[in-house]
Amino acid sequence: MCVASRHTFPQSTILNLIVGSMINTSNTHKSNNIIPRHVAIVMDGNGRWAQQRGKSRMVGHRAGVNAIEKVMRAANDAGVEVLSLFAFSSENWRRPKKEVRYLMRLVSVFRSQAKKLCENNIKLYVVGEMEGLSKSVREITTETLRLTQNNTGLKLVIALNYGGQWDIMQAAKRLAEQVLKKEILLDEINEDIFSKNLVTSELPPVDLFIRPSGVQRISNFFLWQVAYAELYFPDVLWPDFDENAFHQALKFFAGNERRFGKTGEQVKEESHV
């Protein structure tokens, strides 16, 4: 059962705005073969959006929160199963300390928003190197994960202190330990077993990767998971990425023929079986 914490935090933070106005997160439209199960987004362009308006980068991050809310609603309405958001990369520690502190403070809202997450049947996932975060951040995320673990609606994945190279490395280390302990034979390791040792082992592979702002880079996000994803790089900056922009991304996805190594003729033949 979901029980919200008695502790409260400032409401003008990220998940409050993401979740607060959501009406219903149970999928209203069942997924079909042209709707991606898993959409991953690099939320890029907050700083440039603010700079264009003569504002601070923090103002840009705050404006980006509104885009998250809109995209979550659009993803849910379309029948997307998993929405992953790259919130803070392992490389983002190199940013100005003031900006890093601001971004870390946004995590504090997890606990105060647990009740709303439960009411909307959202299951929260947080992936990344938790040991690199402060004790308070780890405690908040752990508590919220526990409170939402039985929810069955939209899966919201927050990548926090995450790097794709780190994820692959930690999976390799886990497998090496299993081999040393003779829990698995070296020759038994394949793509499926490797995937099960990634931090996203409970989630499907990424179908659609979106990076707004026109920058055409993956930037160390879900390197293994995007192997067969469709890559979409719209020119719009993240704070301006709204429901229409998300629908355009889905249209782009639907217009691509996903072959997974096969020929177009094979795919067409199989679609008629």
Image (tube, rainbow, N blue to C red):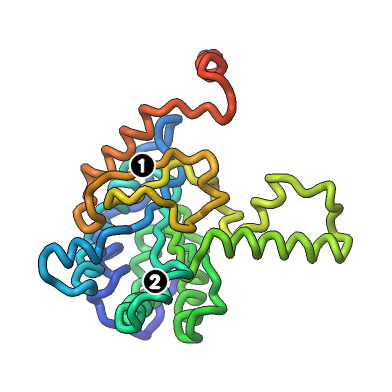
Up-down relation of residue 88 to residue 261 (above or below)? below
Expressed as whole percent of the image width and height from the top left, the position of residue 88 reads 41, 68
Q: Specify the quadrant of the image occupied by residue 42.
A: bottom left
Considering only vertical position in the picture, is 258 above or below 106? above
SS assignment at label 1: strand
The type of residue carrying mark 1 is: Tyr
| Horizontal relation, residue 195 to residue 75: left or right | right
Q: In the image, residue 198 lies at what x, y percent?
A: 62, 58
Q: Position of residue 195 (x, y in %)?
A: 64, 51
- Number of numbered discs present? 2
**Crowdedness near tag 1: few (<14), some (14–19) or many (≥20) residues, C-alpha within 10 Å:** some
Q: Quadrant of the C terminus?
A: top right
Depth-wise, is mark 1 or mark 2 nearer the camera?
Answer: 1
Q: Earlier in the sequence, mark 1 or mark 2?
A: 2
Q: Residue at x 34, y 67 (%)?
A: 116
Type of amino acid at the residue the image marks with label 2? Ala
The residue carrying mark 2 is: 114
Residue located at (48% from left, 41% from top):
229
Q: Are marks 1 and 2 in contact (CB under 8 Å)?
A: no
Q: Residue furthest left?
A: 53
Residue 257 lies in quadrant: top left
Q: Does 180 sit above or below residue 228? A: below
Horizontal side of residue 230 vs 245, given as left or right: right
Quick one: 8 or 2, which is closer to the camera?
A: 8
Q: Which residue is mark 1?
A: 232
Residue sitting at 17 percent across and 67 percent down? 51
SS type, badge 2: helix
